[in-house]
Image (cartoon, grey):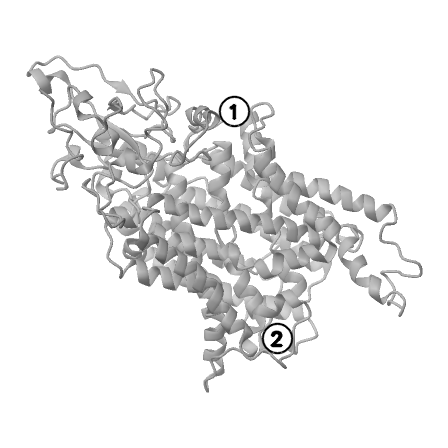
Amino acid sequence: MPLPPPAGLGTSSPPSRAQDHHDPESPSLGRRPGPWPPRMDAGGNQNPRTMGSWARRTGFRSNMSGESAASTISDTDVSNADATLHLKAPNSADLSGGAAPRTPVENGSSAKDPGATPTKVYTPPVSSKRGTGGIDSENVSGVQQSSGQLRGHYRDSEVDMGSQQDMDDVLMAKQSHMKYEIRETPGLVPLILYGLQHYFSIVGSLVLTPLIFVPAMGGSNEDVAKVVSTMLLVTGITTLLHSFFGSRLPLVQGASFAYLAPILTIIHSPEFSSVRQNRFKHIMRELQGAVIISSVFQMVVGYTGLMSIILRVINPVVVAPTVAAIGLAFFSYAFPVVGTCVEIGLPQLLIVLFFALYLRKISVFGHRIFQVYAVPLGLGIIWAYAFLLTETGAYNYKGCNMKLPPSAACQRHVFTMKHCRTDVSTALKDAAWFRFPYPLQWGTPRFSFKTGLVMMAASIIATVDSVGTYHATSLLVASRAPSPGVVSRSIGLEGITSALAGIFGTGAGATTLTENVHTIAVTKMGSRRAVEFGACVLIILALVGKVGAFIASIPTVIVAGLLAFMWTLLTALGLSNLRYSETGSSRNVLIVGLSLFTALSVPAYFQQYGNAGVNAVTEPYFQPYAVAQHGPVKTKNHGANFVLNSVLSMHMVIAFLVAFVLDNTVPGSRQERGVYIWCRPRSARNEPAVVKDYGLPVGRKLFSKVKWVGL
């Protein structure tokens, strides 16, 4: 006689919360989930083709019209899509009434963490005649309805188990677990190796933004070098603070691309168009004040517990288009600058893509160097190539000298020489060997309400970005997703780190870098010690003036090629948040599609409105950021005109507003929306592994009393 299906597969009623073993976050289900993607059973019981879609693994069923129907699985039992299916194994006492326990099957949890207990799971075989969720209920012997438990665990990876895979991807899936968990301390050699490679892999996000906005502010090569050194110092300090007192995840705090659009908008505002003397310091002090104002907003949202409420309305359908729009926002800068010296810029872009895509599976001594180091390798190769072109006289023109005013005959060659030669910048030669970036080095910050509001819009987007990054990273390296209190204190600390960036004068706020998730997934380095070691190295490098000058001397065309790749990666990482929701749902498809379309179309309207006859900026690719001079909002209040024209011309703001309103007003089940599942405070405080992952090293008693910013 066939047994009934396990509980959770055939009923939609949520389990009782009164009992711990019915709590999806209960410690009884195991302290640490297994590897993601799920390991294939050696006996062939799990066929990757039959388990290859999200619908088959979770039992999702749609109605006849094609619209995604609500799953019969309880939202309490199912964490999200792309979950590894584990059924809690009953003991033999459940079946026969005896006391002899049944031998369980371990799910392959990492044995490196001494505090982790392997989850006891029962893996049902997959039959050709599948019932709900692709599981043949006739073959699930020994499982009673009263003891069945469905549990979703995530393990992110470069392998997408939701698509049809070749055998090579299946073999890669078996080795997708982290090499080092979050609390592990690698040996000296792995610590140095992984700590350095973690920052090398995201070097484009760390230090390249000053090479865009500092020259636009009228800064010299020396000013660029100083801002880069300051950014290295602030990145190191803020990363250490976040590792000890924030989320405690192995994340890097740096200048997010979310702040770049507001920075360029403030630079090209009418107020500074007529400034000629000390223009760089004048605008930098304005940016410092704006960043500090926006940081206060983040501190209030985080430390007052307001973030715990906001988490209820921020879902993957909101995060995905918002983060993707950050990368799409700079399409007007990337290739137009690459085209200024196409013989260097185009090979730069192609070689980075070739390394990251075509050579990504090539390993050298167990390390995928081409996938991890695509950006620094591409930078070194193309920079050497450009240097050879310069030294061999490819850009030498008779009677033309970059150090002298161009003659009439050389006028047409100046543009090519400026963008293609590698000896244009003198930053490396003029910089001192040692320099200590100090607070208020550019002068006293200037606080303006209108620029503060514009920068506050960027801090909101950075907060949304950080929420998605916390969730994705925790599924890779931690035993559970962080609790709402941990997220709140992390956002509050991001406010403190942004204020620190404003005081030192980096020009941008310091928030969590999304690109970090890709690095962790590729390197499988989840230890926070490696990130802390790399942060200490950054602090030391910041004191060496030649390092910042070396970065400042990178030709602009090479910078544009690297940033085109980084913005592409950021767009892809943003859209990857949709894997936690039902991507086939017409509801989600329309919301995301409309958000991205309006994020490109609405800002174009603001940027093109009335710009005829307006004084154009020096570089054509910066013209969209001069919108405050000619935008459609024209009231008697000039400050309101500046704020509204600037904010509504930002792609990421429009994407966030459209996605936020639609996702929270259009009906949809929790499973369809992919609501983020955060660790429940009660379960977090009762589970030692979670306390060790997210607990503070000092002041734990204080934060345990203030529950909205603790476990």
Q: Position of residue 62 (x, y in %)?
A: 24, 44
Dot 2 or dot 1, earlier in sequence: 1
Label 2 and label 1: CA atoms lie apart by 52 Å
Query: Residue 325 versus residue 67: which sits nearer the camera?
Result: 67
Question: Could you tell me the amino acid type at mark 1?
Answer: Gly
Badge 2 local density, few (<14 within 10 Å), some, or many (20+)? some
- The quadrant of the image that shows the C terminus is top left
Q: Residue furthest left?
A: 97
Q: Position of residue 543 (x, y in %)?
A: 65, 47
Q: Is residue 246 visible?
A: no
Q: Position of residue 401 (x, y in %)?
A: 88, 60
Say which residue label 1 marks: 187
Instruction: Tell me where residue 19 sits by quadrant.
Output: top left
Q: Residue furthest front?
A: 64
- Which secondary structure, mark 1? loop
Q: Is residue 62 visible?
A: yes
Q: Residue furthest right?
A: 399
Query: Residue 453 versus residue 212: which sits nearer the camera?
Result: 212
- Which secondary structure, mark 2? helix
Query: Looking at the image, is mark 2 or mark 1 nearer the viewer?
Result: 2
Say which residue label 2 marks: 272
